[in-house]
Amino acid sequence: MKKNITINLCGRLFQIDEDAYEMLQQYIESLRRLSGRQEGCDEIVDDIEARIAELFDELKGNGIEAITIDHVKNIITRIGKPEQMAGDSEEKEKGTERDWSEAARSAAEDIFNNVRARTAGKRLYRNPNDKMVAGVMSGLAAYTNTDVTWWRLGIVLLTLCYGTGLIAYIILAIVLPQANSPQEQLQMQGKIVTPQNLADAVVDDQQPRYPQRSGLREIFSVFLKIIIGFFVVIAVFVGAVLGIAFLGVLLTMIFALLMPASTTLSLPFTLGGMGLTEVWVFHPYILIGFAVSLLAVLFIPVYAIIHLVLSLTKKIKPMSVVQRIVWIVLWMIALFLAIALGSTVGTYHDSYNYERMAESRGWMTDVAREYLKELNLTIDKRAHCNSYFVKNGQYFTGDSTVSYIDVNMWGPEEERYFQASRVEEYVNPGTYRISCNARADGGGVCLFATAFGGSYKVTYMVPASGNEGGNIWEEAADMVKSDSLPLAERARKIRDANNGKGFGWNHVEFDTIEINAPTTILYGISTDPGFTDVPCHAQWFSAADFKLERVDDSSN
Amino acid sequence: MNIENAKSQMRKGMLEYCVLLLLKHHPSYASDIIQQLKDAELLVVEGTLYPLLTRLKNDGLLVYQWQESTQGPPRKYYALSNEGESFLDGLNGAWTELSNTVNYLKDIKRMGGEFERIEYNH
């Protein structure tokens, strides 16, 4: 039993078996291609179609209702192979008179054609009939006329060498076309495309294949399938991650471009938030180029995966070889551009960041900047101060990750100028206490507070304990002795962390700030004589935990 | 070189001339021509004829006309054009010469570097 369809050939209807129809179509297609180089090719093929219609009519006249594959085979044999027809006009031309150069040229062409025919006879395809993954190895085996098992074994072994085999396989799977039509399958096996061969291939294709399998091969196949399954899972995962990344980058870029670069919102996905304001203003094309190439790097694989899935579900045609190569090349270009432009953008980002810091008379690392921003501290300094003035560790709390300001000043005494200050706006009338933890050398440094408008100014010199002792450590040592206080644990930590030395940390505070009318207070730590009223020229100091608290009962 | 191949080469050379001869007296369509050529054993595969007809038509030696058929699709009836007629006359002349030459060659025997006519006594 066979499926039967009705075809319209030169305006006449014929009932024809599906396989017979396939074969007829292949035949006509190959005629069209092979006679394509001749003049009036379409006309010739149309005439032959008309002839086929006539022969079908004859069959109908003889009482045959459905045309079978045998009828079509007969007709194809009768009309002849495409090469037989193509030969006609070429041979005629050979008969005409030619001079020697022409003869030589034609001989060269013959040789060329011969060579081409020999290589064109066999083409490298992926074999869909015998495949584990994409049929690449089996296509290679058909091309070289060898056993596919060795190829598979080879690629698995190659994969063990840092994944070389896997990469080679993926590239081949992308580049090689699949031998879908019977004609391509013949070319894959190196058989000449003749009506008979085509017929065989078409008929062969209808029948399911049961390749012979030895036990070893079976085990090998199961083993391979497990590996393949593993890679498929990874591929799906990578695809999902890429897709999400693509959407993320897309959204970020839309936000970044829509939000004005100078926006006060420092959302991480605005240009301002990413520290790219200046890059956007001065080098917009580099930023746009980077954005586009980054999108392309992510978009191309996502597109390829979507295309692949759709083509596997037969919704659209799979990509041609040229398309695949074009996409791969485009992706590589995009990747190259993304890396190159990305590093350029990065360089600009850093240099503008440096400039921005230099403008605000401070140079700092991002970590330091984050720390100061968090504490709402502003830094003013001269050049003779340490660039890296925020440090972690060795801190009196015993927590080595806690940051504190740590400054070294190595200029002449009168140039040792450093100030970390904080502004407290709209301070209500009342009594306030200012405190901080600090240490300094003998040169001294001051904790200060000053009200805007000069209503008052207080300063307090940080005790110079040098690098040992300090009241924090002493207090902690006492606390550990009594052991019953709630802060004993913290105190023990402080004592342990400071390794019996204390590192000179002192708790400094003054609670005599009387505010009579709402005002704004600037307070902090400084070596600037304009703020301290006392000559301070410490060579180093450390400070942390700046606090402004109200000490009188605020409800009164 | 095998004999079949040589024969087929000869037939191929003759095909164009024979098609023109067939069409000289009455217009025919492809299947007619095929039948006649097959009867004369000049044609092995039918497909050879179609490129030939198209080429002759494109060279202006043949013209064709569509005619409805009582059975099957409409048919292309080919006939000689005026140019084709004169072309055929030329070929006729060439054929006469060729066949004379062939006959002559069949009847001589090569002797001492010269050709001498041999009289056969049948």
Image (cartoon, rainbow, N blue to C red):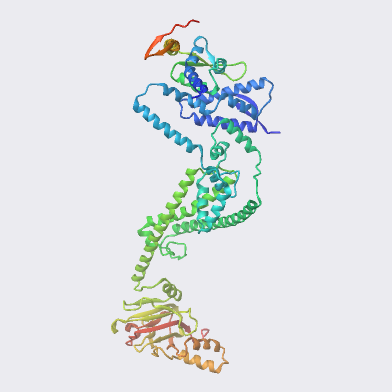
Q: Identify whether A150 is placed above or below B67.
A: below
Q: Quadrant of the N terminus of chain A?
A: top right
Q: Quadrant of residue B30?
A: top right
Residue at 36% over, 68% down: A354
Residue lying farthest top?
B121
Instruction: Please give left or right for residue A156 compared with residue A457 in the image.
Output: right
Residue at 34% over, 77% down: A381
The x and y percentages for residue A407 are: 37, 81
Instruction: Please give left or right for residue A483 compared with residue A372 in the image.
Output: right
The x and y percentages for residue A527 are: 34, 83
Residue at 66% over, 52% down: A215
Evaluate whether residue A441 shows in this view. Answer: yes
Residue at 34% over, 78% down: A385
Q: Identify whether A509 is placed above or below B9.
A: below
Residue lying farthest right?
A1
Question: As rendered, which of A345 and A62 lies closer to the eye?
Answer: A62
Evaluate whether residue A522 shows in this view. Answer: no
Q: Quadrant of residue B44?
A: top right
Question: As rendered, which of A517 and A54 lies closer to the eye?
Answer: A54
Q: Quadrant of residue B100?
A: top left
The x and y percentages for residue A85 are: 51, 25
Question: As rendered, which of A519 and A78 lies closer to the eye?
Answer: A78
How many numbered marks does the figure carry? 0
The x and y percentages for residue A302 are: 52, 52
Q: Identify whether A231 is placed above or below A18.
A: below
Question: As rendered, which of A209 and A405 lies closer to the eye?
Answer: A209
